[in-house]
Amino acid sequence: MGAGLALSVPTWQFVDRAESLSGVVVELVHSGERKGSVYYKPRVRVERPSGESVEFVGRVGSSPSAYRMGEKVSVYLDPARPEDIRLKGFIELWGFAASTGGVGTVFFLIGASLGFIRLWNRRKLARLRQQGDLVLASFDRVEIDTSTTYNDRHPWRVYAHWVDPTTGQRHVFSSEMLWQDPGDRFESQPVRVYVARGNPREYAMDLSE
Protein backbone atom coordinates (compact mmCIF):
# COMPACT_ATOMS: atom_id res chain seq x y z
CA MET A 1 0.00 0.00 0.00
CA GLY A 2 2.78 2.44 0.90
CA ALA A 3 4.43 2.03 -2.51
CA GLY A 4 1.14 2.63 -4.29
CA LEU A 5 0.42 5.77 -2.28
CA ALA A 6 3.95 7.08 -2.85
CA LEU A 7 3.63 6.53 -6.59
CA SER A 8 0.29 8.34 -6.63
CA VAL A 9 1.70 11.63 -5.29
CA PRO A 10 3.16 12.87 -8.62
CA THR A 11 -0.15 12.07 -10.31
CA TRP A 12 -2.07 14.11 -7.71
CA GLN A 13 0.31 17.01 -8.31
CA PHE A 14 -0.13 16.68 -12.07
CA VAL A 15 -3.95 16.62 -11.91
CA ASP A 16 -4.01 19.56 -9.51
CA ARG A 17 -2.08 21.87 -11.85
CA ALA A 18 -3.30 20.49 -15.20
CA GLU A 19 -5.72 22.11 -17.62
CA SER A 20 -8.66 20.13 -19.00
CA LEU A 21 -8.85 19.96 -22.80
CA SER A 22 -10.68 17.98 -25.48
CA GLY A 23 -9.06 15.70 -28.03
CA VAL A 24 -10.01 13.22 -30.73
CA VAL A 25 -8.78 9.67 -31.36
CA VAL A 26 -7.02 9.62 -34.75
CA GLU A 27 -5.48 6.14 -34.70
CA LEU A 28 -5.56 2.83 -32.82
CA VAL A 29 -1.91 1.87 -32.32
CA HIS A 30 -1.01 -1.83 -32.08
CA SER A 31 0.70 -2.21 -28.71
CA GLY A 32 1.25 -5.99 -28.51
CA GLU A 33 -0.38 -9.37 -28.28
CA ARG A 34 -1.07 -11.63 -25.34
CA LYS A 35 -2.73 -15.06 -25.35
CA GLY A 36 -4.01 -14.50 -28.86
CA SER A 37 -5.49 -11.06 -28.12
CA VAL A 38 -4.31 -7.94 -29.92
CA TYR A 39 -3.94 -4.83 -27.75
CA TYR A 40 -4.35 -1.24 -28.93
CA LYS A 41 -3.54 2.18 -27.52
CA PRO A 42 -5.30 5.35 -28.72
CA ARG A 43 -3.37 8.05 -30.57
CA VAL A 44 -5.04 11.34 -29.68
CA ARG A 45 -4.83 14.74 -31.37
CA VAL A 46 -5.14 17.76 -29.07
CA GLU A 47 -5.07 21.47 -29.76
CA ARG A 48 -3.02 23.26 -27.11
CA PRO A 49 -4.17 26.66 -25.80
CA SER A 50 -1.47 28.20 -28.05
CA GLY A 51 -3.33 26.83 -31.08
CA GLU A 52 -0.67 24.23 -31.85
CA SER A 53 -2.00 20.76 -32.70
CA VAL A 54 -0.12 17.84 -31.15
CA GLU A 55 -0.58 14.09 -30.89
CA PHE A 56 0.21 11.62 -28.13
CA VAL A 57 -0.38 7.93 -27.47
CA GLY A 58 -2.27 6.73 -24.40
CA ARG A 59 -0.44 4.82 -21.71
CA VAL A 60 -2.69 1.77 -21.49
CA GLY A 61 -3.49 -0.77 -24.19
CA SER A 62 -6.65 -2.87 -24.20
CA SER A 63 -8.24 -5.72 -26.14
CA PRO A 64 -10.60 -4.96 -27.69
CA SER A 65 -9.76 -1.27 -27.95
CA ALA A 66 -11.45 0.89 -25.33
CA TYR A 67 -11.67 3.72 -27.89
CA ARG A 68 -13.06 4.26 -31.39
CA MET A 69 -11.60 6.17 -34.31
CA GLY A 70 -12.95 9.72 -34.24
CA GLU A 71 -14.06 9.45 -30.62
CA LYS A 72 -13.88 12.68 -28.62
CA VAL A 73 -11.99 12.32 -25.35
CA SER A 74 -11.01 14.49 -22.38
CA VAL A 75 -7.36 14.98 -21.50
CA TYR A 76 -5.17 16.73 -18.94
CA LEU A 77 -2.31 19.00 -20.05
CA ASP A 78 0.37 20.37 -17.74
CA PRO A 79 0.79 24.11 -18.56
CA ALA A 80 4.33 24.03 -17.16
CA ARG A 81 5.25 21.03 -19.34
CA PRO A 82 2.99 21.17 -22.41
CA GLU A 83 4.43 17.90 -23.69
CA ASP A 84 2.93 16.11 -20.66
CA ILE A 85 -0.58 15.19 -21.85
CA ARG A 86 -2.61 12.35 -20.39
CA LEU A 87 -6.03 10.89 -21.02
CA LYS A 88 -8.55 11.35 -18.25
CA GLY A 89 -9.53 8.05 -16.73
CA PHE A 90 -8.73 6.05 -13.64
CA ILE A 91 -6.62 3.36 -15.33
CA GLU A 92 -4.65 5.88 -17.44
CA LEU A 93 -3.86 8.05 -14.43
CA TRP A 94 -3.76 5.69 -11.47
CA GLY A 95 -3.49 2.13 -12.79
CA PHE A 96 0.19 1.58 -12.04
CA ALA A 97 0.04 3.06 -8.55
CA ALA A 98 -3.07 1.05 -7.72
CA SER A 99 -1.56 -2.23 -8.94
CA THR A 100 1.63 -1.56 -6.97
CA GLY A 101 -0.44 -1.17 -3.82
CA GLY A 102 -1.00 -4.95 -3.57
CA VAL A 103 -3.40 -5.77 -0.77
CA GLY A 104 -3.80 -2.07 -0.09
CA THR A 105 -5.37 -1.47 -3.52
CA VAL A 106 -8.88 -1.19 -2.07
CA PHE A 107 -7.72 1.46 0.39
CA PHE A 108 -5.88 3.22 -2.42
CA LEU A 109 -9.05 3.30 -4.51
CA ILE A 110 -11.02 4.75 -1.61
CA GLY A 111 -8.36 7.39 -0.97
CA ALA A 112 -8.16 8.22 -4.67
CA SER A 113 -11.93 8.64 -4.84
CA LEU A 114 -11.90 11.01 -1.87
CA GLY A 115 -9.05 12.91 -3.47
CA PHE A 116 -10.97 13.28 -6.71
CA ILE A 117 -13.93 14.65 -4.76
CA ARG A 118 -11.71 17.21 -3.01
CA LEU A 119 -10.17 18.26 -6.32
CA TRP A 120 -13.57 18.53 -8.00
CA ASN A 121 -14.94 20.62 -5.13
CA ARG A 122 -11.91 22.92 -5.24
CA ARG A 123 -12.30 23.51 -8.96
CA LYS A 124 -16.04 24.00 -8.62
CA LEU A 125 -15.47 26.68 -5.96
CA ALA A 126 -12.90 28.43 -8.17
CA ARG A 127 -15.33 28.41 -11.11
CA LEU A 128 -18.28 29.74 -9.10
CA ARG A 129 -16.09 32.46 -7.57
CA GLN A 130 -15.52 33.74 -11.09
CA GLN A 131 -18.90 33.03 -12.68
CA GLY A 132 -21.39 32.85 -9.82
CA ASP A 133 -22.81 35.12 -7.12
CA LEU A 134 -21.75 35.36 -3.47
CA VAL A 135 -24.49 34.97 -0.86
CA LEU A 136 -24.04 35.20 2.89
CA ALA A 137 -25.88 32.27 4.44
CA SER A 138 -26.92 31.87 8.08
CA PHE A 139 -25.09 29.16 10.00
CA ASP A 140 -27.28 26.24 11.14
CA ARG A 141 -25.08 23.52 12.59
CA VAL A 142 -22.01 21.30 12.33
CA GLU A 143 -22.86 17.63 11.94
CA ILE A 144 -20.88 14.39 11.73
CA ASP A 145 -21.56 12.56 8.46
CA THR A 146 -21.92 8.95 9.61
CA SER A 147 -22.67 7.79 6.05
CA THR A 148 -18.97 8.13 5.17
CA THR A 149 -16.11 6.30 6.91
CA TYR A 150 -12.41 6.36 6.10
CA ASN A 151 -9.68 4.99 8.38
CA ASP A 152 -12.36 4.49 11.05
CA ARG A 153 -13.23 8.18 10.98
CA HIS A 154 -16.33 10.14 9.95
CA PRO A 155 -16.10 13.61 8.38
CA TRP A 156 -17.92 16.72 9.54
CA ARG A 157 -20.18 18.94 7.44
CA VAL A 158 -21.28 22.53 7.96
CA TYR A 159 -24.93 23.36 7.22
CA ALA A 160 -26.30 26.83 6.51
CA HIS A 161 -29.36 28.40 4.87
CA TRP A 162 -30.18 31.45 2.80
CA VAL A 163 -33.49 33.00 1.77
CA ASP A 164 -33.56 34.34 -1.79
CA PRO A 165 -34.85 37.94 -1.45
CA THR A 166 -36.37 37.88 -4.94
CA THR A 167 -38.40 34.67 -4.54
CA GLY A 168 -38.60 34.18 -0.78
CA GLN A 169 -37.41 30.60 -1.27
CA ARG A 170 -35.24 29.04 1.43
CA HIS A 171 -32.12 27.20 0.28
CA VAL A 172 -30.14 24.83 2.50
CA PHE A 173 -26.42 24.38 1.85
CA SER A 174 -23.97 21.77 3.10
CA SER A 175 -20.21 21.88 2.96
CA GLU A 176 -17.87 19.31 1.49
CA MET A 177 -16.51 16.64 3.83
CA LEU A 178 -14.26 18.11 6.53
CA TRP A 179 -11.74 15.83 8.19
CA GLN A 180 -11.03 18.23 11.05
CA ASP A 181 -13.71 19.36 13.47
CA PRO A 182 -14.54 23.00 12.60
CA GLY A 183 -15.85 23.52 16.13
CA ASP A 184 -17.78 26.76 16.67
CA ARG A 185 -15.79 28.78 14.14
CA PHE A 186 -18.87 29.67 12.05
CA GLU A 187 -21.50 30.10 14.75
CA SER A 188 -21.18 33.88 15.02
CA GLN A 189 -20.60 34.84 11.39
CA PRO A 190 -22.26 34.43 7.99
CA VAL A 191 -21.15 31.52 5.84
CA ARG A 192 -19.91 32.43 2.37
CA VAL A 193 -21.58 30.45 -0.40
CA TYR A 194 -21.10 30.94 -4.14
CA VAL A 195 -24.14 30.00 -6.22
CA ALA A 196 -24.59 29.65 -9.97
CA ARG A 197 -26.53 32.54 -11.44
CA GLY A 198 -30.14 31.56 -11.82
CA ASN A 199 -29.58 28.16 -10.18
CA PRO A 200 -28.89 28.27 -6.42
CA ARG A 201 -28.99 24.46 -6.35
CA GLU A 202 -25.50 24.56 -7.85
CA TYR A 203 -23.27 26.00 -5.17
CA ALA A 204 -19.97 25.76 -3.33
CA MET A 205 -19.43 26.71 0.29
CA ASP A 206 -16.28 28.76 0.96
CA LEU A 207 -14.93 27.92 4.40
CA SER A 208 -11.52 29.50 3.93
CA GLU A 209 -10.31 31.98 6.51
Image: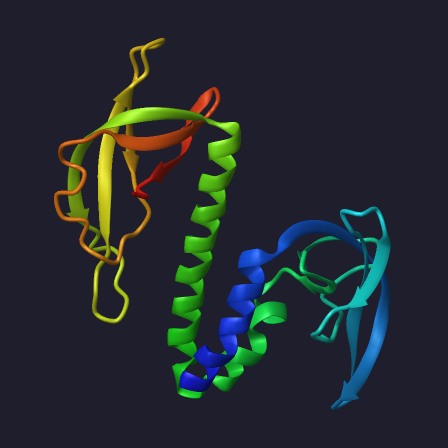
| Residue 96 seen in the current view | yes
Looking at the image, residue 106 sits to the left or right of residue 190; the answer is right
Q: Residue at x 59, y 69 (%)?
A: 93
Total numbered labels? 0
Question: Furthest-top residue in view?
Answer: 166
Report the colour scheme.
rainbow
Q: Which quadrant of the rendered structure holds the N terminus?
A: bottom left
Classify 72 as above or below 26. Answer: above
Q: Is residue 153 above or below residue 125?
A: below
Which residue: 79% across, 86% down? 33
The quadrant in which residue 135 appears is: top left
Going 18% across and 38% down the picture, which residue do you hit?
A: 186
Quarter-of-image position of residue 60: bottom right
- Res. 58 image quadrant: bottom right
Answer left or right for 162 relative to 125. left
Residue 183 position, x and y percent, is 13, 48
Q: Residue 77: x and y, percent?
A: 68, 58
Position of 139 relative to 163 (above/below): below
Give the x, y percent position of residue 96.
57, 80
Q: Quadrant of the C terminus?
A: top left
- Residue 1 in sight in this render: no
Q: Is residue 32 above or below residue 178?
A: below
